[in-house]
Image (cartoon, grey):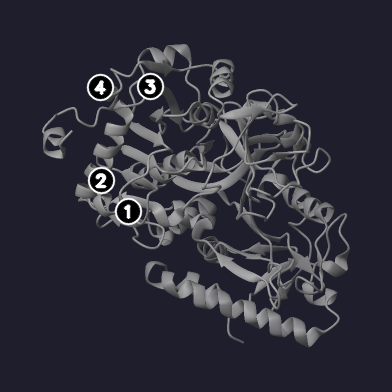
Amino acid sequence: MKISTVLSRDNHYELKKHVQHIKNVYEQLSPTQLREAILKRKEGVEADSGALVIETGKFTGRSPKDKFIVEDEMTRETVNWNDFNIPISPAHFDKIFETAVEHLEKLDEVWIRNSFAGAKQEYRIGIRTYCSQAFGDLFAYNMLIRPTEEELADFKPDWKVLWLPELNLSKEVCGTRQENAAVINFDKRIVVIAGTAYTGEIKKGVFTILNYLLPMQHNVLSMHCAANMGKDGDTALFFGLSGTGKTTLSADPDRGLIGDDEHGWADDGIFNFEGGCYAKTIDLSEKKEPQIYAAIKEGALLENVKFFEGTNKVDFSNKDITENTRVSYPLHYIPGAVIPSVGKSPENIFFLTCDAFGVLPPISRLSVEQAMYQFISGYTAKVAGTETGITEPKSTFSACFGAPFIPLHPGKYAEMLKERLIKHKTKVWLVNTGWTGGSYGTGSRIKLEYTRALIKAALRGDLDNVQYTNLPLFNLSMPVECPGVPSEILNPENTWEDKAAYREKLSFLAGLFRNNFKKYEEGVEASVIQAGPSEA
């Protein structure tokens, strides 16, 4: 197929015409039917829980340097081009699409699914996925919103996602960095994912679409966060990078889970983008995370886990393939999940950070400007590895707690957050789930029971009328007391034996914040910059 011929066709980008001659085209298969296909094709095996186990091969996580957005008249002046939003030309996209279509037409089997993204009907988009392997279709079933029979009868996709993990691209012809790529074309409303079997590329490709369209077209704030709801209907949001406890803390048996990862905030409340959960499973235990553990049953899809030798029982502590082991399952697998997954505007928002430097308080109350600053910063810290001589933790900043998925300038999302915080009088809390009494290697991890108690106290309003004290440099307001939590740990300096070392480390972290924020200063108000850490 010559590209000049392809581009002359009016319906070139209508993928359905490219699959009409494929011998076996499967549409809207049930999880039971997909299970049979996955086992028959030897794409995966069954665990003792009934869940399917697959391996994603070379890629066990996203490849952010290989995610591209087509630069055209629509995106040229609106996308915040950077290391995560990498431009690719329309001509190169056509080469990629041609390669993908040629590969697609040679397949013996393909799986097609119609789904929605967005639990609020007025904001949702229709997604049609084309997968060359059955487990990709099961992932789409689990993670996207499943239409009713009536909705399927007249379904018209707004977007199409083509997932071809076995297809390796020519980087010379296609203009990519290497043989794999995830490419988003907002003009043609197509996503092409090639050369990687990591299913999370499907999920985050759709998320990126919503992060661009909803703020621009509907004034809906798109957010990388978990959400839950209390018995009285009050909602709370949990932002946090990997390892901060977002999934653990939002999965509260006393509150209904709205969603664990992606949400929108419209004028009339919040809503989940997804129909499922994609949870990390490393070191998962029934005691620590009972809801997630119980969800790993028939219909769930486990990725890159290993069995105990000689069994089909999953060893969740095994890191032989990757630490980024995952499971996808429908939202209704979580008891008490809120379906449809919508809620009121949040009364409380929690920014979770795992501060391995041990200098941030277990909880602090943020002003609106501080909330914007912390939101844009998206801070956490990862502990140093086992490499000889490395003893310091590594700081990580990810704008809006999801930099790889936000196409617009972070200041745009922060302004939208500000408007909503003021309008709904939402309280924002910075919660340190990391270290106390010293940095990693000296201090200890803040007990999970204390973090849970602090969050419950904030949700109940117990922290509204207590006395607060100030954290130097960061100017954070720290409560001096909280039910169920020793008062001495609420001010982190109290937990360090060497007070001078504490102040030195606090100053060091403040400097990291200031240096990181410089790249965003042109896109935010002066009051937000001033809400960050001071030099003295």
Specify the quadrant of the image occupied by residue 107: top left
For mark 3, what is the residue?
108
Q: Residue at (49%, 69%) from the top-left corner?
A: 528
Q: Residue at (72%, 46%) from the top-left corner?
A: 248
- Distance, label 2 to label 1, CA atoms, is 10 Å
Q: Is the residue 533 above or below the residue 246 in the image? A: below
Q: Nearer the viewer, residue 439 or 201?
A: 201
- Distance, label 2 to label 3, CA atoms, is 25 Å
Q: Residue at (34%, 44%) from the top-left corner?
A: 184
**Which mark is nearer the camera, 1 or 4?**
1
| Whether residue 37 can be seen here | yes
For the residue labelled by badge 1, is the local secondary structure a helix, a strand or a loop? loop
For mark 1, what is the residue?
176
Q: Is the residue 151 above or below the residue 519 in the image? A: above
Specify the quadrant of the image occupied by residue 158: top left
If you read the primary sequence from the N terminus, does the residue marked by circle 2 or circle 3 appear first? 2
Name the residue type under label 1. Answer: Thr
For mark 4, what is the residue?
17
Q: Residues within 10 Å of mark 4 (few under 14, many from 20)?
A: few
For the residue labelled by badge 3, is the local secondary structure a helix, a strand or a loop? loop
Q: Residues within 10 Å of mark 3 (few under 14, many from 20)?
A: few
For mark 2, what is the residue?
93
Q: Residues within 10 Å of mark 1 (few under 14, many from 20)?
A: many
Could you tell me residue 525's position as x and y percent? 42, 69
**Which mark is nearer the camera, 2 or 1?**
1
- The mark tally for this picture is 4
